Amino acid sequence: MSNIIKLIQNENMKIYRRVSTWIMFIILVGAAVVVGIVMNATASNSENENWKQNIQAENEMYKADLSNENLPDMVKDFSKRELAINEYRLEHDIAPVEARSTWNFMTATSEIVSLITLFTIVIGASSVASEFTWGTIKLLLIRPVSRAKILLSKYLATILFALVSLALLFIVSFLVGSIFFGGGDSTPHLVYRDGAVQEVHMVSHILGIFGLKSINLIMMSTFAFMISTIFRNSGLAIGLAIFLMFAGVNATALLAMKFDWAKYILFANTDLSQYLTGNIFVEGMTMSFSIIMLVIYFIIFNALTWFVFMKRDVAA
């Protein structure tokens, strides 16, 4: 265990001694500040003044969807959930979250997690490939430490960078939101679970959003780490991972319109928030199914990484 900790510390020193790493953190903070400035200049709470009338209008639309026999069950389920939540709001006089609020701002900044994914892909892709490029892999392997521990330390250091970046974004988002929009109010978030509407504290809801966003972050970082290890080429790993990150979801969505087997593709399962919004890729998919698929892909990526790294000859 002590060897692993020392190896992780060594990898962290490599990561955080780079100027590029701190530039990434500055860009991350800057992105949150820019979103805050834009929202502060453009967001308005005018819709909340007539929120009851707006919700009543929405309810009429949802009722029309439920009575329309031509609509798919997936759309009807979504309308049923939203109708129940809206009726709960009216009954308990709970207004929607204001546009100019810390919570709404943090929900918006959760999209910046995709930027963290890009940065982590770069870190993960260069972790192993750079050792082969500069020939330093030989110096690592002559140490009295197994290859498995060396590889594990590099992977854990990459994931740790992702988690640190995620925590930084969360903290900065709350601070920037508090500066521009004041402290978070006590308005609860409403969810529809097990056939009933439940109130969830906003902090728990925001943490849940960031948590769900981190799924794609971990999977794409693991994929880039795998490609980097197998092909010893950081450029290929970065390029392929970024391409799939942006094109994978769209391509999967197109396939899902015609083929049920699209549900087995990785990108159909990385966004678990689809089960909260009702916008499910393929009808019949469940959160349990997606979690199982993610675990399978995660095991495959890491198994291939481990197998190739353990068997590779680096003597030449």
Image (cartoon, grey):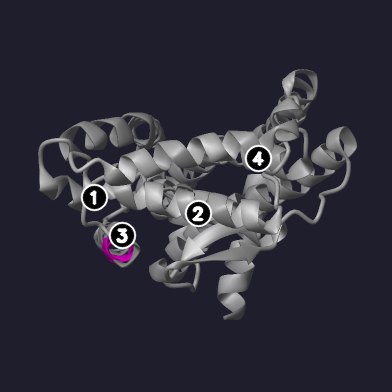
Decide which of tag 2 and tag 4 comes sooner along the chain. 4
Residue picked out by circle 2? 212
| Viewer can see residue 287 | yes
Decide which of tag 4 and tag 1 comes sooner along the chain. 4
Decide which of tag 1 and tag 2 comes sooner along the chain. 1
Q: In this view, does 248 lie to the left or right of 20?
A: left
Judge by depth and name the residue closer to the eye, 224 or 109: 109
| Viewer can see residue 157 | no
Q: Quadrant of the N terminus?
A: bottom right
Examine the structure image and report whether residue 153 is included in the region drawn in magenta: no
Examine the structure image and report whether residue 291 is included in the region drawn in magenta: yes
Residues drawn in magenta: 289-296
Amino acid type for the residue under numbered disc 4: Lys
Judge by depth and name the residue closer to the eye, 212 or 23: 212
User: In the image, is residue 6 above or below residue 158?
Assistant: below
Numbered circle sitting on residue 290: 3
Where residue 191 appears, as percent x and y from the top left, is: 54, 59
Numbered circle sitting on residue 73: 1
Is the residue marked by circle 3 packed among few (<14), some (14-19), or many (20+) residues within 10 Å? many
Mark 4 vs mark 1, CA separation in Å: 27 Å
Decide which of tag 2 and tag 3 comes sooner along the chain. 2
Numbered circle sitting on residue 52: 4
Badge 2 vs badge 3, beta-carbon distance below 8 Å: no
User: Looking at the image, is mark 1 or mark 3 nearer the viewer?
Assistant: 1
Where residue 9 appears, as percent x and y from the top left, is: 65, 62
Element on which disc 3 rests: helix
